[in-house]
Image: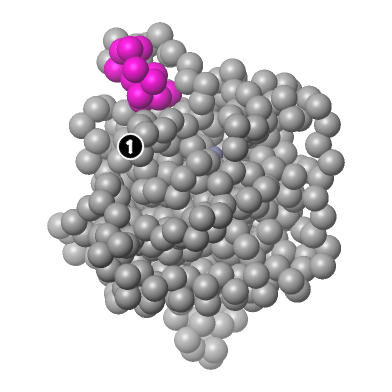
Amino acid sequence: MAPRSRTKSWPLGLALVALGATACSKSPDVAKRPNILLITVDTLRADHLQPYGYQRPTSPQLAELAQGAMVFEDAQSTAPWTLPSLASLVTGLPAAAHGCRSFYSSLAPSYSTLAEQLLAGGYDTAAVVSHVFLGRPYGLHQGFVHFDDELVLELTRSDQAISSKAVSDKGLAYLDAKAAAGGDEPWFLWLHYFDPHSVYQAHPDQVGTFGTKRPMDLYDGEVAFTDRHIGRILDGLGGLGLTDDTVVVFTSDHGEEFQDHGGLDHGHTLHEELLHLPLIIRVPGEDPGRHAGMVRIIDVPATILDLATLPAAPESFGQSLRPLIEGRAGPDLPPAIAELDRNTYRDQISLTTTETKVILNRQTGKPELYDRVGDRSEQHNLAPAKQAETQALLEELAILQQAAVDVAARHTDRVDQNLGTPEIENLSGLGYVDDKE
Ligand SMILES: [Zn+2]
Protein backbone atom coordinates (compact mmCIF):
# COMPACT_ATOMS: atom_id res chain seq x y z
CA MET A 1 0.00 0.00 0.00
CA ALA A 2 1.28 3.47 -0.87
CA PRO A 3 2.32 5.66 2.05
CA ARG A 4 -0.32 8.11 3.19
CA SER A 5 -0.06 11.33 1.24
CA ARG A 6 -0.42 14.35 3.47
CA THR A 7 -0.30 16.77 0.57
CA LYS A 8 -3.52 15.45 -0.96
CA SER A 9 -5.54 15.90 2.19
CA TRP A 10 -4.99 19.66 2.38
CA PRO A 11 -8.56 20.79 2.96
CA LEU A 12 -9.08 18.61 6.03
CA GLY A 13 -5.48 18.66 7.21
CA LEU A 14 -5.21 22.42 7.29
CA ALA A 15 -8.54 22.77 9.02
CA LEU A 16 -7.49 20.29 11.68
CA VAL A 17 -4.31 22.24 12.34
CA ALA A 18 -6.38 25.40 12.63
CA LEU A 19 -8.63 23.89 15.26
CA GLY A 20 -5.64 23.03 17.41
CA ALA A 21 -3.73 26.27 16.85
CA THR A 22 -5.78 29.44 17.06
CA ALA A 23 -2.81 31.54 15.90
CA CYS A 24 -3.36 30.53 12.27
CA SER A 25 -7.14 30.23 12.35
CA LYS A 26 -7.60 33.28 10.10
CA SER A 27 -5.90 31.70 7.10
CA PRO A 28 -8.31 31.92 4.12
CA ASP A 29 -7.47 28.34 3.12
CA VAL A 30 -9.03 27.09 6.35
CA ALA A 31 -12.45 28.19 5.13
CA LYS A 32 -12.38 25.56 2.38
CA ARG A 33 -14.36 22.61 3.63
CA PRO A 34 -14.81 19.41 1.61
CA ASN A 35 -17.94 18.75 -0.41
CA ILE A 36 -20.04 15.95 1.05
CA LEU A 37 -21.83 13.37 -1.13
CA LEU A 38 -24.12 11.15 0.97
CA ILE A 39 -25.55 8.18 -0.93
CA THR A 40 -28.14 5.95 0.72
CA VAL A 41 -29.89 2.94 -0.80
CA ASP A 42 -33.13 1.74 0.73
CA THR A 43 -33.46 -1.88 1.90
CA LEU A 44 -29.86 -2.79 1.13
CA ARG A 45 -28.42 -5.57 3.24
CA ALA A 46 -24.67 -5.33 3.53
CA ASP A 47 -23.91 -8.98 2.75
CA HIS A 48 -25.42 -8.69 -0.75
CA LEU A 49 -22.63 -6.32 -1.79
CA GLN A 50 -19.25 -7.37 -3.19
CA PRO A 51 -17.28 -5.22 -0.68
CA TYR A 52 -18.98 -7.31 2.03
CA GLY A 53 -18.02 -10.64 0.51
CA TYR A 54 -21.03 -11.33 -1.74
CA GLN A 55 -20.10 -13.70 -4.55
CA ARG A 56 -22.66 -12.43 -7.09
CA PRO A 57 -21.63 -9.37 -9.18
CA THR A 58 -24.27 -7.06 -7.69
CA SER A 59 -22.05 -4.07 -7.03
CA PRO A 60 -18.96 -3.46 -9.17
CA GLN A 61 -19.27 0.31 -8.77
CA LEU A 62 -19.45 0.14 -4.98
CA ALA A 63 -16.56 -2.35 -4.99
CA GLU A 64 -14.50 0.24 -6.83
CA LEU A 65 -15.53 2.94 -4.35
CA ALA A 66 -14.60 0.63 -1.47
CA GLN A 67 -11.11 0.04 -2.87
CA GLY A 68 -10.27 3.67 -2.17
CA ALA A 69 -12.26 4.04 1.06
CA MET A 70 -12.69 2.92 4.65
CA VAL A 71 -15.12 0.01 4.75
CA PHE A 72 -16.92 -0.38 8.08
CA GLU A 73 -17.68 -4.08 8.26
CA ASP A 74 -20.16 -3.93 11.15
CA ALA A 75 -22.38 -0.83 10.94
CA GLN A 76 -25.68 -1.13 12.84
CA SER A 77 -29.01 0.60 12.23
CA THR A 78 -31.43 1.86 14.88
CA ALA A 79 -34.47 0.21 13.30
CA PRO A 80 -35.38 -2.31 10.59
CA TRP A 81 -37.46 0.15 8.54
CA THR A 82 -36.97 3.47 6.81
CA LEU A 83 -38.38 6.33 8.84
CA PRO A 84 -36.71 5.75 12.24
CA SER A 85 -33.45 4.69 10.61
CA LEU A 86 -33.12 7.72 8.35
CA ALA A 87 -34.27 10.02 11.18
CA SER A 88 -31.30 8.58 13.12
CA LEU A 89 -29.01 9.20 10.15
CA VAL A 90 -29.92 12.90 10.10
CA THR A 91 -30.07 13.51 13.88
CA GLY A 92 -27.48 11.11 15.37
CA LEU A 93 -30.17 9.93 17.77
CA PRO A 94 -31.74 6.53 18.46
CA ALA A 95 -35.44 6.06 17.68
CA ALA A 96 -36.76 6.71 21.19
CA ALA A 97 -34.90 10.05 21.20
CA HIS A 98 -36.01 11.45 17.82
CA GLY A 99 -39.48 10.00 18.20
CA CYS A 100 -40.01 8.86 14.57
CA ARG A 101 -41.21 5.42 15.59
CA SER A 102 -44.49 4.94 13.71
CA PHE A 103 -45.64 5.86 10.21
CA TYR A 104 -47.74 8.62 11.76
CA SER A 105 -44.59 10.25 13.20
CA SER A 106 -42.83 13.36 11.97
CA LEU A 107 -39.44 14.75 12.99
CA ALA A 108 -40.22 17.81 15.12
CA PRO A 109 -38.69 21.14 14.01
CA SER A 110 -36.83 21.53 17.32
CA TYR A 111 -34.37 18.73 16.44
CA SER A 112 -30.99 19.65 14.92
CA THR A 113 -30.35 17.89 11.61
CA LEU A 114 -27.13 17.21 9.73
CA ALA A 115 -28.29 19.46 6.88
CA GLU A 116 -29.11 22.32 9.26
CA GLN A 117 -25.65 22.14 10.81
CA LEU A 118 -23.89 21.98 7.44
CA LEU A 119 -26.01 24.90 6.24
CA ALA A 120 -24.98 26.90 9.31
CA GLY A 121 -21.37 25.96 8.52
CA GLY A 122 -21.56 27.58 5.09
CA TYR A 123 -22.66 24.65 2.94
CA ASP A 124 -25.15 24.63 0.10
CA THR A 125 -27.48 21.74 0.98
CA ALA A 126 -29.39 19.59 -1.51
CA ALA A 127 -31.31 16.32 -1.44
CA VAL A 128 -32.94 14.11 -4.05
CA VAL A 129 -35.36 11.69 -2.43
CA SER A 130 -37.43 8.79 -3.69
CA HIS A 131 -39.26 7.32 -0.70
CA VAL A 132 -42.52 8.44 0.88
CA PHE A 133 -40.83 8.61 4.32
CA LEU A 134 -38.53 11.31 2.97
CA GLY A 135 -41.49 13.41 1.86
CA ARG A 136 -41.87 16.76 3.63
CA PRO A 137 -44.64 15.65 6.02
CA TYR A 138 -42.10 13.40 7.78
CA GLY A 139 -39.80 16.33 8.55
CA LEU A 140 -36.41 14.98 7.42
CA HIS A 141 -36.12 17.78 4.83
CA GLN A 142 -35.12 20.27 7.56
CA GLY A 143 -32.01 22.21 6.56
CA PHE A 144 -32.08 21.53 2.82
CA VAL A 145 -31.98 24.61 0.61
CA HIS A 146 -32.72 22.42 -2.42
CA PHE A 147 -35.08 19.55 -1.63
CA ASP A 148 -36.19 17.58 -4.69
CA ASP A 149 -39.16 15.42 -3.68
CA GLU A 150 -40.64 15.24 -7.18
CA LEU A 151 -40.13 11.46 -7.26
CA VAL A 152 -42.10 11.12 -4.01
CA LEU A 153 -44.92 13.45 -5.08
CA GLU A 154 -45.48 11.93 -8.52
CA LEU A 155 -45.72 8.36 -7.25
CA THR A 156 -48.97 7.16 -5.79
CA ARG A 157 -47.62 3.60 -5.66
CA SER A 158 -43.90 3.97 -5.09
CA ASP A 159 -43.52 0.20 -4.62
CA GLN A 160 -44.02 -0.26 -8.36
CA ALA A 161 -41.68 2.53 -9.43
CA ILE A 162 -38.16 2.39 -10.78
CA SER A 163 -36.35 5.57 -9.81
CA SER A 164 -32.56 5.04 -9.69
CA LYS A 165 -31.96 6.55 -13.11
CA ALA A 166 -33.98 9.65 -12.19
CA VAL A 167 -32.18 10.05 -8.84
CA SER A 168 -28.80 9.96 -10.61
CA ASP A 169 -29.97 12.29 -13.40
CA LYS A 170 -31.10 14.83 -10.80
CA GLY A 171 -27.88 14.42 -8.81
CA LEU A 172 -25.75 14.94 -11.92
CA ALA A 173 -27.79 18.02 -12.84
CA TYR A 174 -27.05 19.48 -9.40
CA LEU A 175 -23.31 18.77 -9.70
CA ASP A 176 -23.22 20.29 -13.20
CA ALA A 177 -25.07 23.39 -12.00
CA LYS A 178 -22.68 23.85 -9.09
CA ALA A 179 -19.67 23.45 -11.37
CA ALA A 180 -21.11 25.93 -13.89
CA ALA A 181 -21.86 28.48 -11.16
CA GLY A 182 -18.29 28.30 -9.82
CA GLY A 183 -17.54 29.81 -6.43
CA ASP A 184 -15.94 28.44 -3.30
CA GLU A 185 -19.05 27.40 -1.38
CA PRO A 186 -18.87 23.73 -0.39
CA TRP A 187 -21.95 21.58 -0.97
CA PHE A 188 -23.72 18.71 0.73
CA LEU A 189 -25.72 16.46 -1.61
CA TRP A 190 -27.84 13.56 -0.30
CA LEU A 191 -29.12 11.06 -2.85
CA HIS A 192 -31.56 8.41 -1.61
CA TYR A 193 -32.13 5.44 -3.95
CA PHE A 194 -35.15 3.20 -3.54
CA ASP A 195 -35.20 0.37 -6.09
CA PRO A 196 -34.12 -2.65 -3.97
CA HIS A 197 -37.26 -2.10 -1.85
CA SER A 198 -40.13 -4.52 -2.48
CA VAL A 199 -42.00 -5.06 -4.74
CA TYR A 200 -38.91 -6.27 -6.65
CA GLN A 201 -38.92 -5.35 -10.33
CA ALA A 202 -37.15 -7.33 -13.06
CA HIS A 203 -34.53 -5.35 -14.98
CA PRO A 204 -34.12 -6.96 -18.41
CA ASP A 205 -30.34 -6.49 -18.55
CA GLN A 206 -29.87 -8.06 -15.09
CA VAL A 207 -32.16 -11.08 -15.53
CA GLY A 208 -29.48 -13.08 -17.36
CA THR A 209 -27.06 -12.62 -14.48
CA PHE A 210 -29.28 -13.33 -11.50
CA GLY A 211 -32.44 -15.01 -12.82
CA THR A 212 -36.01 -14.42 -11.66
CA LYS A 213 -36.79 -17.69 -9.89
CA ARG A 214 -36.54 -16.53 -6.27
CA PRO A 215 -37.33 -13.16 -4.68
CA MET A 216 -33.61 -12.90 -3.88
CA ASP A 217 -32.72 -13.15 -7.58
CA LEU A 218 -34.94 -10.21 -8.43
CA TYR A 219 -33.63 -8.30 -5.39
CA ASP A 220 -30.03 -8.81 -6.49
CA GLY A 221 -31.00 -7.52 -9.94
CA GLU A 222 -32.43 -4.37 -8.33
CA VAL A 223 -29.21 -3.91 -6.32
CA ALA A 224 -27.11 -4.25 -9.48
CA PHE A 225 -29.36 -1.81 -11.34
CA THR A 226 -28.99 0.73 -8.52
CA ASP A 227 -25.22 0.17 -8.35
CA ARG A 228 -24.93 1.03 -12.04
CA HIS A 229 -26.68 4.35 -11.51
CA ILE A 230 -24.57 5.13 -8.44
CA GLY A 231 -21.56 4.56 -10.69
CA ARG A 232 -22.83 7.34 -12.97
CA ILE A 233 -22.73 9.79 -10.05
CA LEU A 234 -19.23 8.73 -8.99
CA ASP A 235 -18.04 9.01 -12.60
CA GLY A 236 -19.72 12.42 -12.84
CA LEU A 237 -17.81 13.56 -9.77
CA GLY A 238 -14.57 12.47 -11.42
CA GLY A 239 -15.52 14.08 -14.74
CA LEU A 240 -15.98 17.43 -13.01
CA GLY A 241 -12.61 17.07 -11.26
CA LEU A 242 -14.27 16.97 -7.83
CA THR A 243 -13.08 13.60 -6.52
CA ASP A 244 -10.20 15.14 -4.53
CA ASP A 245 -12.50 17.77 -2.97
CA THR A 246 -15.39 15.50 -2.01
CA VAL A 247 -16.03 13.13 0.87
CA VAL A 248 -18.26 10.24 -0.26
CA VAL A 249 -20.37 8.46 2.35
CA PHE A 250 -22.33 5.39 1.31
CA THR A 251 -24.82 3.56 3.53
CA SER A 252 -28.32 2.11 3.75
CA ASP A 253 -31.31 2.40 6.10
CA HIS A 254 -31.91 -1.30 6.84
CA GLY A 255 -31.54 -4.71 5.27
CA GLU A 256 -33.99 -7.31 3.97
CA GLU A 257 -34.89 -10.82 5.08
CA PHE A 258 -34.88 -13.84 2.80
CA GLN A 259 -36.16 -16.36 5.33
CA ASP A 260 -33.04 -16.03 7.52
CA HIS A 261 -35.50 -16.26 10.43
CA GLY A 262 -38.48 -17.64 8.55
CA GLY A 263 -39.75 -14.36 7.10
CA LEU A 264 -39.46 -12.03 4.13
CA ASP A 265 -39.22 -8.27 3.63
CA HIS A 266 -38.30 -5.99 6.58
CA GLY A 267 -39.71 -4.15 9.56
CA HIS A 268 -40.65 -7.27 11.52
CA THR A 269 -37.55 -8.30 13.53
CA LEU A 270 -34.32 -6.87 14.95
CA HIS A 271 -32.07 -9.57 13.53
CA GLU A 272 -28.73 -9.04 11.79
CA GLU A 273 -30.09 -9.34 8.23
CA LEU A 274 -32.23 -6.26 8.93
CA LEU A 275 -29.91 -4.14 11.10
CA HIS A 276 -26.49 -4.71 9.46
CA LEU A 277 -25.76 -1.82 7.11
CA PRO A 278 -23.03 -1.20 4.57
CA LEU A 279 -20.97 1.88 5.49
CA ILE A 280 -18.23 3.03 3.14
CA ILE A 281 -16.52 6.42 3.57
CA ARG A 282 -14.02 7.79 1.09
CA VAL A 283 -12.02 10.79 2.28
CA PRO A 284 -9.59 12.40 -0.20
CA GLY A 285 -5.99 11.76 0.76
CA GLU A 286 -6.73 9.00 3.27
CA ASP A 287 -5.58 5.43 2.79
CA PRO A 288 -8.22 2.79 2.20
CA GLY A 289 -8.87 0.22 4.89
CA ARG A 290 -11.38 -1.97 6.67
CA HIS A 291 -12.68 -1.65 10.24
CA ALA A 292 -14.10 -4.79 11.81
CA GLY A 293 -15.53 -3.39 15.06
CA MET A 294 -19.16 -2.39 15.54
CA VAL A 295 -20.11 1.18 14.61
CA ARG A 296 -23.56 2.80 14.42
CA ILE A 297 -25.66 4.71 11.93
CA ILE A 298 -25.94 7.45 14.60
CA ASP A 299 -22.15 7.94 14.28
CA VAL A 300 -22.47 8.97 10.62
CA PRO A 301 -23.63 12.60 11.09
CA ALA A 302 -20.97 13.27 13.76
CA THR A 303 -18.37 11.81 11.37
CA ILE A 304 -19.50 13.96 8.45
CA LEU A 305 -19.53 17.10 10.62
CA ASP A 306 -16.06 16.28 11.96
CA LEU A 307 -14.74 15.83 8.40
CA ALA A 308 -16.28 19.24 7.65
CA THR A 309 -14.55 20.61 10.83
CA LEU A 310 -17.93 21.42 12.33
CA PRO A 311 -19.18 20.41 15.79
CA ALA A 312 -21.63 17.55 16.30
CA ALA A 313 -25.21 18.38 17.26
CA PRO A 314 -25.48 19.17 20.99
CA GLU A 315 -27.87 16.27 21.64
CA SER A 316 -26.20 13.72 19.33
CA PHE A 317 -25.61 10.24 20.71
CA GLY A 318 -23.16 9.54 17.88
CA GLN A 319 -19.39 9.89 17.85
CA SER A 320 -17.02 10.76 15.04
CA LEU A 321 -15.39 7.84 13.20
CA ARG A 322 -12.86 10.22 11.63
CA PRO A 323 -9.94 8.90 13.73
CA LEU A 324 -10.56 5.39 12.35
CA ILE A 325 -10.63 6.74 8.79
CA GLU A 326 -7.30 8.46 9.44
CA GLY A 327 -5.72 5.28 10.81
CA ARG A 328 -5.76 6.40 14.44
CA ALA A 329 -7.35 4.80 17.51
CA GLY A 330 -11.11 5.12 17.36
CA PRO A 331 -13.63 6.24 20.00
CA ASP A 332 -14.82 3.81 22.64
CA LEU A 333 -18.35 3.48 21.30
CA PRO A 334 -21.32 2.56 23.50
CA PRO A 335 -23.42 -0.36 22.22
CA ALA A 336 -25.96 0.14 19.43
CA ILE A 337 -29.62 0.17 20.39
CA ALA A 338 -32.45 -0.58 17.97
CA GLU A 339 -36.17 -0.92 18.38
CA LEU A 340 -39.54 -1.70 16.90
CA ASP A 341 -42.33 0.35 18.43
CA ARG A 342 -45.70 -1.10 19.35
CA ASN A 343 -47.46 1.40 17.10
CA THR A 344 -46.04 -0.18 13.99
CA TYR A 345 -45.03 -3.79 14.25
CA ARG A 346 -43.86 -5.97 17.07
CA ASP A 347 -42.64 -4.41 20.24
CA GLN A 348 -38.95 -5.24 20.52
CA ILE A 349 -35.70 -3.58 21.53
CA SER A 350 -32.08 -4.69 21.12
CA LEU A 351 -28.56 -3.90 22.26
CA THR A 352 -25.57 -4.83 20.10
CA THR A 353 -21.84 -4.84 20.78
CA THR A 354 -19.06 -6.20 18.58
CA GLU A 355 -19.25 -9.51 20.48
CA THR A 356 -22.81 -9.89 21.75
CA LYS A 357 -26.43 -9.00 21.09
CA VAL A 358 -29.53 -9.12 23.24
CA ILE A 359 -33.09 -8.71 21.93
CA LEU A 360 -36.00 -8.16 24.32
CA ASN A 361 -39.58 -8.79 23.23
CA ARG A 362 -41.40 -6.19 25.32
CA GLN A 363 -44.77 -7.85 24.79
CA THR A 364 -43.75 -11.24 26.18
CA GLY A 365 -40.80 -10.12 28.33
CA LYS A 366 -38.69 -12.86 26.72
CA PRO A 367 -35.03 -12.07 25.93
CA GLU A 368 -32.75 -13.60 23.28
CA LEU A 369 -28.95 -13.59 23.50
CA TYR A 370 -26.59 -14.16 20.57
CA ASP A 371 -22.84 -14.63 20.23
CA ARG A 372 -21.95 -12.32 17.32
CA VAL A 373 -18.46 -13.77 16.96
CA GLY A 374 -19.47 -17.42 16.53
CA ASP A 375 -23.09 -16.97 15.38
CA ARG A 376 -23.30 -13.75 13.40
CA SER A 377 -26.53 -14.85 11.69
CA GLU A 378 -28.22 -15.22 15.11
CA GLN A 379 -29.47 -18.77 14.85
CA HIS A 380 -28.75 -19.97 18.43
CA ASN A 381 -30.45 -18.20 21.34
CA LEU A 382 -28.14 -18.45 24.35
CA ALA A 383 -30.40 -16.57 26.81
CA PRO A 384 -31.74 -19.65 28.64
CA ALA A 385 -28.20 -20.89 29.27
CA LYS A 386 -26.64 -17.49 30.10
CA GLN A 387 -29.18 -15.72 32.27
CA ALA A 388 -26.76 -13.56 34.26
CA GLU A 389 -25.05 -12.22 31.14
CA THR A 390 -28.44 -11.61 29.52
CA GLN A 391 -29.67 -9.71 32.57
CA ALA A 392 -26.57 -7.50 32.68
CA LEU A 393 -27.01 -6.54 29.02
CA LEU A 394 -30.71 -5.82 29.55
CA GLU A 395 -29.82 -3.47 32.41
CA GLU A 396 -27.34 -1.63 30.17
CA LEU A 397 -30.02 -1.47 27.47
CA ALA A 398 -32.54 0.03 29.93
CA ILE A 399 -30.10 2.81 30.90
CA LEU A 400 -29.34 3.72 27.27
CA GLN A 401 -33.02 3.64 26.34
CA GLN A 402 -33.94 5.89 29.27
CA ALA A 403 -31.34 8.43 28.11
CA ALA A 404 -33.00 8.39 24.69
CA VAL A 405 -36.49 8.79 26.15
CA ASP A 406 -35.23 11.76 28.19
CA VAL A 407 -34.15 13.53 24.98
CA ALA A 408 -37.58 13.04 23.41
CA ALA A 409 -39.24 14.49 26.52
CA ARG A 410 -37.41 17.79 25.91
CA HIS A 411 -38.98 18.15 22.44
CA THR A 412 -42.52 19.21 23.23
CA ASP A 413 -43.27 20.14 19.59
CA ARG A 414 -43.57 16.53 18.46
CA VAL A 415 -46.91 15.84 16.73
CA ASP A 416 -48.29 12.87 14.82
CA GLN A 417 -49.65 13.22 11.28
CA ASN A 418 -53.17 12.54 10.16
CA LEU A 419 -52.73 10.20 7.20
CA GLY A 420 -55.44 10.04 4.53
CA THR A 421 -56.61 6.96 2.63
CA PRO A 422 -54.21 7.41 -0.35
CA GLU A 423 -51.22 7.63 1.97
CA ILE A 424 -52.34 4.55 3.90
CA GLU A 425 -52.81 2.64 0.63
CA ASN A 426 -49.34 3.63 -0.55
CA LEU A 427 -47.80 2.51 2.76
CA SER A 428 -49.79 -0.71 2.53
CA GLY A 429 -48.32 -1.41 -0.92
CA LEU A 430 -44.87 -1.00 0.61
CA GLY A 431 -45.66 -3.54 3.31
CA TYR A 432 -45.78 -0.97 6.10
CA VAL A 433 -49.37 -1.47 7.21
CA ASP A 434 -49.75 -4.91 8.68
CA ASP A 435 -53.14 -5.64 10.18
CA LYS A 436 -52.22 -9.24 10.93
CA GLU A 437 -50.36 -8.28 14.08
ZN1 LIG B 1 -36.22 1.61 3.90
Is residue 221 magenta-colored? yes
Given residues 171 and 167, the one toward you in this image is 167
- Residue at image position (45%, 50%) is 270
| Image: magenta residue range | 210-222
> Is residue 12 depicted above or below 433 in this figure?
below
Q: Secondary structure at mark 1?
A: loop
Amino acid at the residue labelled 1: Asp
Image check: 183 left or right of 108?
A: left
| Number of callouts | 1
- Residue at image position (56%, 46%) is 346
For residue 415, say whether it is visible: yes
Image check: 320 left or right of 188?
A: left
- Residue at image position (25%, 64%) is 385
For residue 307, say whether it is visible: no
Q: Quadrant of the N terminus?
A: bottom left
Given residues 326 and 86, the one toward you in this image is 86
Quickly name the residue at label 1.
260
Colour scheme shown: one colour
> Is residue 257 depicted above or below 426 in this figure?
below
Is residue 6 magenta-colored? no
Circle 1 crowding by C-alpha within 10 Å: few under 14, some 14–19, many from 20: some
Q: Quadrant of the C terminus?
A: top right
Asked which quadrant contains residue 107, the reply is: bottom right
